[in-house]
Amino acid sequence: MIKLNAKEKCPFFKECPYNSNSLCQGADPLRETEFICDFVNKYGIFNEGRFRNKYDKTGKMEIILENEQ
């Protein structure tokens, strides 16, 4: 996990598989919020099989799926 302060750009944004087309908020140097990413550790090793929503401004957004009946 890495913690980025407001306006701090992720050091792994170029090689991050979750930053397709620079849509991850962690790659935005103008972001006004703290961003916590648990998709990568401080050594640049990525967790596989995750999804990053481009609207997740904090890194804490959860996706809730309702049961379809």
Image: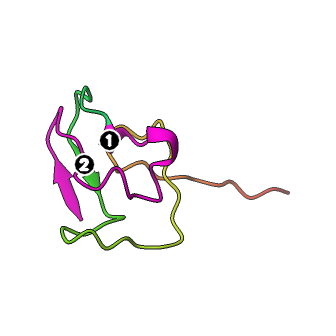
Which residues lie in the magenta part? 1-27
Residue 23 seen in the figure: no
Checking the image for residue 10, the label placed there is: 2
Identify the residue at image location x=22%, y=41%.
9
Q: Is residue 25 left or right of residue 48?
A: left
Quadrant containing the C terminus in the rendered view: bottom right
Identify the residue at image location x=51%, y=65%.
50
| 37 or 20: nearer the viewer | 20
In the image, residue 1 lies at what x, y percent? 24, 65
Q: Is residue 51 left or right of residue 59?
A: right
In the image, residue 48 lies at what x, y percent? 48, 73
Residue 5 on the magenta span: yes
**Residue 47 quadrant:** bottom left
Residue placed under numbered mark 1 in the picture: 27
Residue 12 seen in the figure: yes
SS for callout 1: helix
**Marks 1 & 2, CB-CB < 8 Å contact:** yes
Identify the residue at image location x=57%, y=53%.
64
Predominant SS of the magenta segment: loop
Q: Is residue 39 left or right of residue 53?
A: left
| 43 or 38: nearer the viewer | 43
In the image, residue 2 lies at what x, y percent? 20, 59
